Amino acid sequence: MDEDLGSLIGVGRAADVYDQGDGTVLRRYRSDHESELEGRMMMWVSDRGVPVPTVHRARGRDIVMDLVEGPTMMQNLESRPWLLLRYARMLARLQRQINELEAPTWFPRHEGVTPGTSVIHLDLHPMNVILGADGPVVIDWTNASRGHSSFDAAMTYVLVSTFDPSDRVARLGQRAFVEGFAISRGRRSIRAALNEGARYRLLDPNITDGERASLQRILIARHP
């Protein structure tokens, strides 16, 4: 008998998300993944005040956690673009809250990430923040690790600024959001690791041709 996973509600680059109908969701990775470690990191940051979904089980390729009702920050921006600067500041504030935590030694270190002692998310962008009834919730801790806070700031800058918008209006909104994030997060912190962040992102085999071209432009602009 086929396994009943629930209703498919999300498809990411590495995993699928299913609503199990009992107030929880199942995030199932399509390939081998250390779900136990990811779940442990989520529970650790949750205990220290970072808003994340409550994890119930993490084993093998599966993580079961609370279903957080609400749109993503990106979805809400599409219908309420006038909130752009408010959300840019919110994203910066959430990242600072994460980075202020000193990571325990069991948090992984990733090759190519600037060494440091902070908790870093490495994939914080408007599609990974759900605007729940009780406030924003940070999801997708797949890449979380131990490193330097400036690297995390640079990664968010890189992710948001190289996303390929659908049209000219969306591109203008993207630029305003990036500018608002940079001002709130701190340009100096972003610049400190921008080259390293762009190179790290280039190693991702799932990036699009448009993202790759944008990343290369960042590196050329920094080293003409």
Image (cartoon, helix red, strand yellow):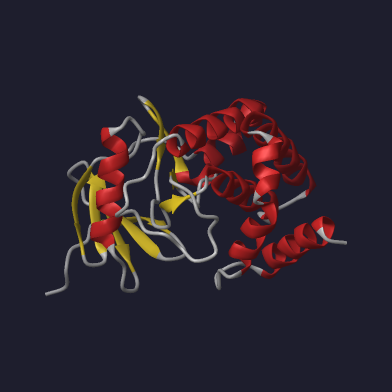
As drawn, 146 above or below 49:
below
Q: Is residue 205 left or right of residue 4?
A: right
Q: Quadrant of residue 63?
A: bottom left
The quadrant of the rendering that contains the N terminus is: bottom left
Report how many numbered discs are placed on residues in the image: 0
As drawn, 176 above or below 205:
above
Q: State the image coordinates of residue 57 (x, y, percent, origin top left).
A: 17, 52
Q: Quadrant of residue 15?
A: bottom left
Measuring 64% from the left and 48% from the top, which residue is drawn there?
160
Residue with the most extreme right position: 224
Q: Nearer the viewer, residue 110 or 216?
A: 110
Q: Nearer the viewer, residue 218 or 115?
A: 115
As drawn, 136 above or below 220:
above
Q: State the image coordinates of residue 156 (x, y, percent, origin top left).
A: 59, 47
The quadrant of the rendering that contains the C terminus is: bottom right
Q: State the image coordinates of residue 68 (x, y, percent, origin top left).
A: 32, 38
Measuring 55% from the left and 55% from the top, which residue is drawn there?
114
Measuring 70% from the left and 42% from the top, which residue is drawn there?
174
Q: Nearer the viewer, residue 3 or 94?
A: 94
